[in-house]
Image (tube, helix red, strand yellow):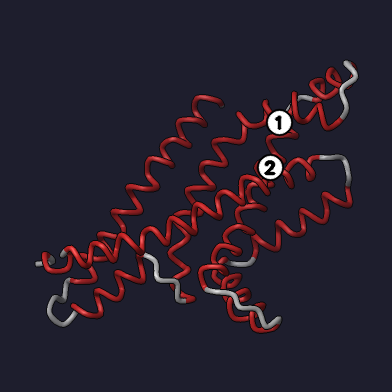
Amino acid sequence: MGENLFNLSNLLRLGEGLLVSLEISLISIAFSIVGGLFLGVLMSLKNKWLYMFLKICLEIVRIMPQIVWLFIFYYGVARAFNLHLSAFGASVIVFSIWGVFEMMDIVRGAVVSIPKHQFESAAALGLKTADIYKSVIIPQAIRRLIPGAVNLLSRIIKTTPIVVLIGVVEIVKVAQQIIERNVFSDNLAPFWLYGFVFLIYFILCYPISKFSLLLEKKWS
């Protein structure tokens, strides 16, 4: 049983769905890295108003579940401002925002963990603030933030299946469509298809998780 579920046509459709999932994840991860590094450095500066503003944004993003953000952007913001926003576009925006602010906090933590004498020594050499961060602080902080950043990237990949709830045809949606077409001829179709999706995500995320743990042990 289950052999007919994994014919060439279905496998191709599942592959196309997986590509959509990975596309959302990779685009969001790219924005998260760039935006998170920039905002993380800003948050580490000794500006209490800037820190408070970014901290409030971070808490808002953390408190609100990602699925609610998806509904807000896809059903709320797009219609309120008469924007043509696809489900794919809304997914990228939501996951990018989430990733940027989570990465920002990781970067901030890594930067403030650098001993103060590193700042003081660089300033004593006559370096400007921008040069201190560029040449001294950020290179040291990157080593400290990589384990947390890798873990965040894994979480982004694992969370993307929720985009099925706003109609994105990714791997979970494709599996659901195949199940609906075969459930009466094979009552184990949900087991086989969702088990296959589980295996795919396990293959994608397990090595990333192990790599994160390895880095934490190596650099702790």
Which residue is located at x 62 percent, y 74 percent?
73
Q: Position of residue 151 (x, y in %)?
A: 51, 44
According to the picture, the residue beneath numbered tag 2 turns out to be: 37
Say which quadrant the N terminus sits in.
bottom left
Say which quadrant the C terminus sits in.
top right
Which residue is located at x 74 percent, y 28 percent?
137
Name the image quarter holding residue 168: bottom left
Compared to residue 147, the image places residue 119 above or below, namely above
Amino acid type indicated by mark 1:
Ile
Name the image quarter holding residue 22: bottom left
The reply to whether the C-beta atoms of the residues labelled 1 and 2 are less than 8 Å apart is yes
Disc 1 secondary structure class: helix
Residue placed most toward the observer, 65 or 73:
73
Residue placed most toward the observer, 90 or 162:
90
Which residue is located at x 65 percent, y 78 percent?
83
Q: Position of residue 54 (x, y in %)?
A: 78, 54
Q: Residue furthest left?
A: 1
Q: Earlier in the sequence, mark 1 or mark 2?
A: 2
How many numbered badges does the structure rendering display? 2
Amino acid type indicated by mark 2:
Leu
Q: Is residue 159 left or right of residue 187?
A: right
Q: Position of residue 16 (x, y in %)?
A: 34, 62
According to the picture, the residue beneath numbered tag 1 turns out to be: 138
Residue placed most toward the observer, 122 or 26:
26
Say the numbered circle drawn on residue 84. Answer: none
Which residue is located at x 47 percent, y 61 percent?
160
